[in-house]
Image (cartoon, grey):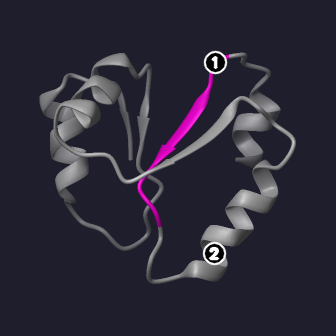
Amino acid sequence: IRAYRSSGTDLPLVIVGDHNHAPDYAALLRREAEGDPRIRFLGYRFGDELWRLYAGCRLFVLPSESEGMPLVLLEAMAARCAILA
């Protein structure tokens, strides 16, 4: 969120999913995004709706320190998204 805010872009930052195992971290992210209407938290999305999000994204970012090859990364690759992982 900090990098996005400093990027100067008008494109939205769409965050899909949630962080059930670390609710404090999820709350921190929401606080960091406060006041910026370009940042949208959509929660979990599935099926056709998720595939429409993949199809419309300019860049799929997976900022994970622990996941080796998560399904969402494979799905984004299958949807031909540009990837930053």
Local packing at callout 2 (Cα closer than 10 Å; few below 14, some 14-19, many 20+) is few
Magenta segment range?
11-18
16 vs 39, left or right, is left
In the image, which disc is placed on residue 25? 2
Q: Residue at x 16, y 39 (%)?
A: 47
Q: Which residue type does callout 1 highlight?
A: Leu
Q: Residue at x 63, y 18 (%)?
A: 11
Q: Residue 53's spot in the image, x, y percent? A: 34, 28
Q: Residue 26's spot in the image, x, y percent? A: 61, 69
Q: Which residue type does callout 2 highlight?
A: Tyr
In the image, which disc is placed on residue 11? 1
Residue 61 location, quadrant: top left
Q: Secondary structure at mark 2?
A: helix
Q: Residue 70's spot in the image, x, y percent? A: 21, 59
| Number of dots carrying numbers | 2
Q: Residue at x 44, y 69 (%)?
A: 65
